[in-house]
Image (cartoon, rainbow, N blue to C red):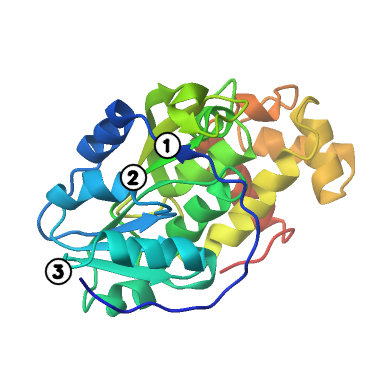
Amino acid sequence: MGGLAISRGRRRALGQHWLVERRYLRRIAEAARPSPDETVIEVGAGPGNLTRFLLPYCSRLIAVEIDEKLASRLQDRFSGTPHLWIVQADVLQVAPAELLAMAGSGPPYVVVGNLPFSIGTAVVRHFLRATPQPRWLVVTLQLEVAQSMVASPGRMSYLSVETQLLASPRLLFVIPPWAFRPPPKVYSAVVRLEVRPQPLVPAEDMEALLKVAQAGFAAPRKQMRNSLTIGLKVAPQVAEEWLRAAGIDPARRPGELTLEDWLRLFHVVRAWGQVGHG
């Protein structure tokens, strides 16, 4: 087993609920089945429940665990496993390229993990915005968060837009609370996110586009003309002019817009100089 471990990053109570039901662990490992050229980064390995099911499918597995005691137990549990590296670290504080280098590896790579509810969205964002990006992620999230990521127009949120600009997400299956120890108070879901080979906008425009989307969801229950007025602090007449120029009915609500709508609106708002050019 690769013996490299590091101690860095934040120490915090993540409120983790460990998935223990074998049928769901097996389903995640099967859904995550990587190709031989892909290195797998497992986030939040914990006691190694999922690690054990992933190992037969992986040519290289990097298991990341923030807790020092758990990381040490993983070292003991899987000693003598040559294609496994245990890394004790806060995954949000380590670049994926650094993790890959610890295993003498590089792209392509993929991400798998039963993510703590408190940092699930942050972990997904961390890898989707990383350089290099993974090919895909298979992660367990709180059901409500998973549903938001995969939502279609009519039920979209800012998280839907942010996620789908960079990946094509699909909800694979739901996991009940009793499959975890201790059981959480909510259901969970496993999501597969296929990272887009090419983002829908150039990387240098992504922050500006997300600023427009964030402004558009400033008041998600209001009509777009009102929500955009609040979010970008402009006159209602200006917000309405932007929306009409983008071919969007100002009376629509933010959750009803498609990705194409947001892209057109971004280009209009940028042309007015309200958000920066890349």
Q: Residue at x 32, y 45 (%)?
A: 50
* Residue 1 in which image quadrant: bottom left
Q: Amino acid at mark 1?
A: Leu
Question: As displayed, is residue 34 above or below residue 92?
Answer: above
Residue with the mark numbered 2: 49
Residue 259 appears in the rendering: yes
The kind of residue tagged 2 is Asn
Residue that appears at 59% across and 25% down: 186
The span from disc 1 to disc 2 (Cα, nearest Å) is 7 Å
**Precedes in sequence: disc 1 or disc 2:** 1
Total count of labels: 3
Callout 1: 10 Å neighbours few (<14), some, many (20+)?
many
Amino acid at pointer 3: Pro
Which residue position holds label 3? 82
> Residue 9, how many percent across, how many down?
57, 74
- In this figure, which residue is indicated by the disc labeled 1? 19
Element marked by disc 2? helix
Q: CA distance from mark 2 to mark 3?
A: 18 Å
